[in-house]
Amino acid sequence: DTGVSQNPRHKITKRGQNVTFRCDPISEHNRLYWYRQTLGQGPEFLTYFQNEAQLEKSRLLSDRFSAERPKGSFSTLEIQRTEQGDSAMYLCASSAGAENTEAFFGQGTRLTVV
Amino acid sequence: AQTVTQSQPEMSVQEAETVTLSCTYDTSESDYYLFWYKQPPSRQMILVIRQEAYKQQNATENRFSVNFQKAAKSFSLKISDSQLGDAAMYFCAYSQSSMNNNAGNMLTFGGGTRLMVKP
């Protein structure tokens, strides 16, 4: 297993278009997180899955954002009707189920909305 | 809500010297975890060191150690014998015990400190 994988690495889209990102966590990890990081800032939590269940969503996640994790494996994050303010790095992380286990991060998907 | 503050946007250290990065946090919880993550340019974030709040002993990982002051809600990172490969963004992060919430080990990050290492 090579760690958390995110695709694509970069995405440029026109305002108003829909985009979808994919995250493949480490295979035995049942916890999966999405974060958003804008330039020069720390990552901000977006949403959390335990297996296939989405247990927590941040207020940052507007109704244009949706995330899924079918069968508790890979996850997708979709942004509909993108806006320039959506431009950011979207990070995925996964961890095993035990308390206080290390979160492993992917390299992220950098979204630019023009 | 928990907050994490890193008051040093940038720090610089001479190779082989020691540098300390500051972090303060705010929480009303008694059981939580604190972390330092390193984010090299264009590479993924990796865990440097973590501290359980219930442990009084400061965590140490090779050249990295922390000074955890629970009453002061302070969590600083000391890097000894700095190396060129230590140059990166460093993020302090907080995680509530997952026993008490539905957000797993969700991390709350500070704004980061850019560390530059001079040869």
Image: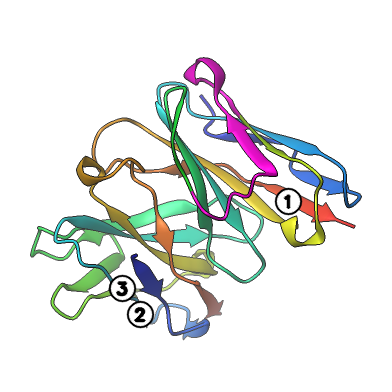
Tell me the subunit letter for badge 3. B
Which mark is nearer the camera, 1 or 2?
A: 1
Residue A5 in percent (x, y) is at: 61, 33
* Residue type, numbered disc 1: Arg
Residue at the (53%, 68%) spot, across then down: B89
Residue at the (53%, 65%) spot, across then down: A42
Toward the viewer: A112 or A80?
A: A80
Residue at the (22%, 76%) spot, across then down: B73
Alpha carbons under labels 1 and 2: distance apart: 28 Å
Number of numbered discs = 3
Q: Which residue is mark 3?
A: B25
Is the same chain shared between marks 1 and 3? no
Alpha carbons under labels 2 and 3: distance apart: 10 Å
Residues at discs 1 and 2 in contact (Cβ within 8 Å): no
The C terminus of chain A: image quadrant: bottom right
Residue A105 in percent (x, y) is at: 51, 44
Residue B38 against residue B7 in the figure, above or below: above
The residue segment tinted magenta is A58-75
Q: Residue A46 colored magenta?
A: no
Residue at the (30%, 30%) spot, across then down: A97
